[in-house]
Each structure stands twice: as C-alpha cells, then as structure tokens.
Amino acid sequence: MLKVSAGALKDILKGTDPIALFAFEEGLAGAAFLSPAARKSLLARAKDEGFSGKAGETVSFLASDGSKERRFVLAGLGKKASLDREGIRKAAASLYKAYKKRFPSLGFCPHTEIQASAEGLLLSSYEFSRYKKPEEGVLLTSVLVPWADARERARCEAALAKAALAAEAVFFARDLVNTAPSDKTPLSLAEAAKGLAGSGVTVSVIEKEEAADLGMGSFLGVARGSVHPPALVHLIYKPKGAKKKVALVGKGITFDSGGLSLKPPQSMETMKCDMAGAALVFGVFKVLARLKPKVEVHGYAVMTYNLPAAAAYKPGDVLRARNGKTIEVLNTDAEGRLVLADALCLAAEEKPDAIVDFATLTGAVLIALGSSVTGAMTNDKALLARLSSASRLADEPLWELPLPKEYEENIKGKIADLQNIGKVRGEAGTLIGGLFLREFVGETPWVHLDIAGTAWTDSEKPYCPAGGTGVPVRTVLEYLSAF
C-alpha cells in the first residue's frame, strides 16, 4: 500500500530518489529549492521531451538539480488560471499511474494543496485484490513530501494525516462494495462492523428477533425472501464535550434482485453495490476516532438481501413501519426506502440535530444527474448548505432536487397510509423516493443523498478504478470535521 509521508527537504535532496514536481503550461509550480538556472534547464529539457504542462501530461528525464544530476518527474496542471483542488488530485493521480511500476519511491514537491495532492496519489493507488493476485514487480510504495522548517513541517504532516484518513475510509467502503454479494451476508457485515469498536466507538447489532420486537415491519418485510437473516448495525462515536449530535443512516441491500418484481438480468450485474450507503457509514466510522471531530455521531447501517422466494413479500402486501405508518407495497424493487424507513425512525428517536441518509435509491437520479453528481433532498436548507460546503472541499458535487408539495399525493396509499412507488409510473422517481423517506424523520433536520449514480463506476475514473467509488465518504468527513 502506498504511504505518503513528510520528510526534510535537505534529506530528500541528499537522496537518489526521483523528485516529482507539478508544472503549469506557463512554467514550474513551486520548486523554490531550484536555482533559476536549474529551473530554466529543467523546463528546456521537459520541452525537448514533448512536455507542455497540460493537465494529465507526465514526463521523466535526467537533469541537474543544481548540484548533481538526478531523475525528475513532472506532472501537468494545465493553465494557472484554471487551477483547483480537483485538478491537483487528478494531476497527482496521473503521476502515480504513470510511474507506479517504474520507481519504488519518490520525493514529491506539490507546491500547494498538500492534502489534495496526497489524496490524488493515495486514492489512485487503490486496488481490490481479494479475488486475484495483487500486482507484482516494482511498485511505488513510498512518497516523501518535503518540509523546510518546523512550521511547514506541522502543516505538511497535518495535511498528509487527513489525506491518509480520508483514503483509508474510502478504501474500506470500496472494499465492502466490491466484495461479491454471497460473501457479504448481513450478519457477516455486522461482524466486520464490530471490529470498528474501540477508541471511543461502540457497536451494537439489532438482529431479526429484536427488530420484530422494535416494530420494524417495513425492514423485516423486505428481508423475508432471503435465508440469510437481516441485521441493523448501530455505531456510536461520543467524544467528551460534544454539544451536537448527527445521525448517519445507510441503506445496505447486500444484493438486490428486485424481489418478486424481478430486475432484468443485466440490471442485476452491479447490484452488489446496493449496500453502498451502509459501506459509507462503516468507512466513516473506520477513521472517526482518529479524526476526532467534536460532534456525537450515530451510524445506522440497515442490511438485508432483497430476493424472490416462497416467503418473499409481494406486491399488494401492507407493511407497518416502526412509527406506525402502514405502507402498501406496489413494487418490491422499491425496497431501499422500506428498509430505510425503520432505520430513520430509530435515528429520529435519538433526537439528533441532523440526520443524513445515504442510499443507492433510484435509477432515475442517474438519468437526471449522471454518474458524477449526487442528488440531495432536504427539509432543512441550512443543513444542506453545510453539507454542500463540505462537498465542495471534497469535490464530490451535490445538487439539490425539490420535494414538491403537489407530489405528496403520489405516495398516499389506497388501502394504507403510504405506497412505496408513485401513482404515475416512471415520473419523478427520485423525488418520490425523497418524499417517502421524509415521512419517517419527523421534524428532525434531514438530508437524503441519492448516490445511485455516484457510488459506482463502470469505467476507470482519474483516481478510482471501475467498481465502488466510496463517494461521498470524503464529503461526510469534511462535514463532521467542521463541528
């Protein structure tokens, strides 16, 4: 696994490892340790190699650092005027991908935005190798970022530590999502969650019998089709002096066949991803005690398979949620909102200052916003504003979608309080899902994030291979850090 750490500039220059630098189209970014003559020579050499500093470009060559010849590696940032944190992450990712099999270690002078630079390197180094042999041969495992004095050292080490925690949380979530569905039963994930206990985190598991005693009929209705029993994990991080309380609720359908409203075969191929909301909650709690935010955090991961079987719940069934509301089931493939309903009730009973839920809820959000933007719905604009601010720091975009009052009639059931899909099939599916979930949070400030488009990628992205993305773990960590 790649390690990015801080080291003294003088020690890095004494060594023989290649030194990696960023470069704009207009010239080098930073690298103040180089003399004007060395900088000029370096740029000339890069130009000879066909490097122009455009975003995504990389080049490697031998040149003088002013005292000796050594290997330099350059990564392009594009034009200065367009520089942002995401461009830095992508440039660092390009650097890692280009040279991960050429050099075992590098010195790296990122100039600015040390955290974003480290995130780009670390996140792009992810590999899911549970079912295959890991890559062999030379592999970049160590990157040293230089500091020149004590003040700079403290700033550098703090930024690198935060990037490392973010990457660890994302990797944990990605691993869970990428695991084959038969290898992640609800109870096996609950056992894995117990390993997160300690250092200020407590973990409890609500199993089938207790869920029945708690009146969680909506959750248990979905679970009826599987021989593997369901589980709801409750994690708590409670630091001393915390004055605010936040609840994170994650959908954890460990495989979604659609139930008796069976999905087409092709649509099932990625349905091991339907527990990405629960994976996000686990990823956040993996690092929460070390991040040390000054807020009490409750995590709820509600987990079951959604499968067809003789005992499976059926279109036309009526389920009763923990808050007493009855739900007419018209489509068993709209199961995520049913399991979340009971988890949201539990979360609201804790009387938190905010509830944020995460769910791969609707294919409609992918049609509306694509695979790079998460849909957000809320009953509290101020809460969404804080989450949106965190998402901008993480460069994991959110886009608010409305919860129109005139659509509320669409979730009213004919023979029950609610129905689990809208009355007009195929219309405003994401908004209908949000309106349904709002019925279970009471007056608590709440944001629903539909991550059906962003939690998974079919193709490689700049710092994420195909598969689970871990979005928006970094946004949540930024949000909690702001307390």
Image (tube, rainbow, N blue to C red):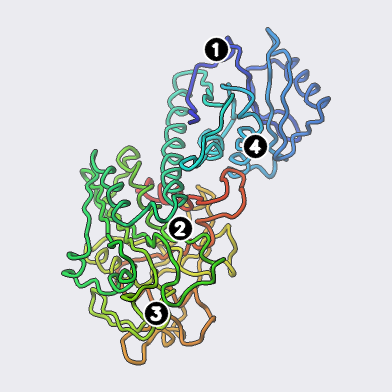
| Residue bearing the label numbered 2 | 272
User: For this rendering, which residue is in front, 317 or 356?
Assistant: 317
- Most extreme residue toward the top is 67
Which badge, 1 or 3, is on the more N-terminal residue?
Answer: 1
Image x and y of residue 399, in percent: 53, 63
Query: What residue is rendered at 44% in x and 52% in y?
Result: 180
Query: What residue is rendered at 40% in x and 65% in y?
Result: 447
Query: The residue under label 4 is which amino acid type?
Result: Ser
User: For this rendering, which residue is in front, 26 or 296?
Assistant: 296
Is 367 left or right of 319, judged from the image as shown?
right
Which badge, 1 or 4, is on the more N-terminal residue?
Answer: 1
Q: CA distance from mark 2 to mark 3?
A: 22 Å
Say the numbered circle drawn on residue 384.
Answer: none
| Residue bearing the label numbered 4 | 94
Is 53 left or right of 337, judged from the image as shown?
right
Q: CA distance from mark 2 to mark 1?
A: 49 Å
Image x and y of residue 305, in percent: 37, 64
| Residue bearing the label numbered 1 | 10
Query: The residue under label 2 is which amino acid type?
Result: Lys
Dividing the picture into quarters, in which one does residue 345 lie?
bottom left
Q: Secondary structure at mark 2?
A: helix
